[in-house]
Image: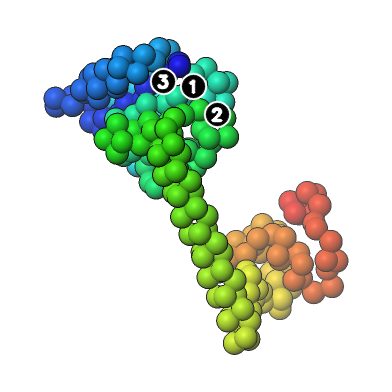
Amino acid sequence: MNAALYARVSTNGHGQTVEPQLLELREYCERRGWQIVGEYLDEGISGAKDSRPELNRLMADAHKRRFDAVIVWKFDRFARSVSHLLRALETFNALGVAFVSLSEQIDTTTPTGRMIFTVLGAVAELERSLIAERVKAGLRNARAKGKRLGRPRVSVDTARIARLRAAGASWRDVSTALGVSIGTCHAAAPGRSKKPATRAAVSA
């Protein structure tokens, strides 16, 4: 089996290095008889960051099926959150790529590891369903109380628009004075067409 190793440290220097992680990962692959075909190392990069160069490269290579398994030392070296971990595991599962975390002893090449992945996925799905239901319940409650949903309407002083235009102010000047968009000014202006303003009209 071809394996990819992923390791990360938050601080580059001060004695922190990915080497201890890599040593254990390499030894694990040697014991399993797996061939290491890539090492992806993010050094000096916080795990909270949405984008990590080497992690991004690993995910891209996973989609190209350049390896059969991803091996990490610990979950928090790989994922920034539980939801991020589950999304990655779901991606690997769909691609037929196994995932191994040494510290947590999770190995999706084994029946136990696959069972744990299934349980984690079910918990994540339940959480998504509960969140969606809470949102729907909140909307129903708001409607029952007569609350208006969606973006609030902008109140525009149409008389002031008329005065400013009569005084020779441009639509841009009117927009600035009222603190609303030029399109809103056009729509609210007395006697104006409700169609969007043309570029020529806006610059007038």
Reply above or below: 91 against 181: above
Find numbered disc 2 in the image and state the secondary structure of the residue it sits on: loop
Name the residue carrying label 2: 96
Image coloring type: rainbow
The amino acid type of the residue labelled 2 equals Gly
Q: Which numbered disc flags the more N-terminal residue, 2 or 3?
A: 3
Q: Residues within 10 Å of mark 3 (few under 14, many from 20)?
A: many
Residue 158 on image: x %, y %: 71, 76
Find numbered disc 3 in the image and state the secondary structure of the residue it sits on: strand
In the picture as drawn, the residue positioned furthest to the left comes out as 15
Is 44 left or right of 199, judged from the image as shown?
left
The amino acid type of the residue labelled 1 equals Asp
In the picture as drawn, the residue positioned furthest to the front comes out as 111
Is 30 left or right of 191, judged from the image as shown?
left
The amino acid type of the residue labelled 3 equals Ala
Name the residue carrying label 3: 4
Q: Is residue 7 visible?
A: yes
In this rendering, which labeled residue sits more in front, label 1 or label 3? 1
Q: Residue at x 84, y 61 (%)?
A: 195
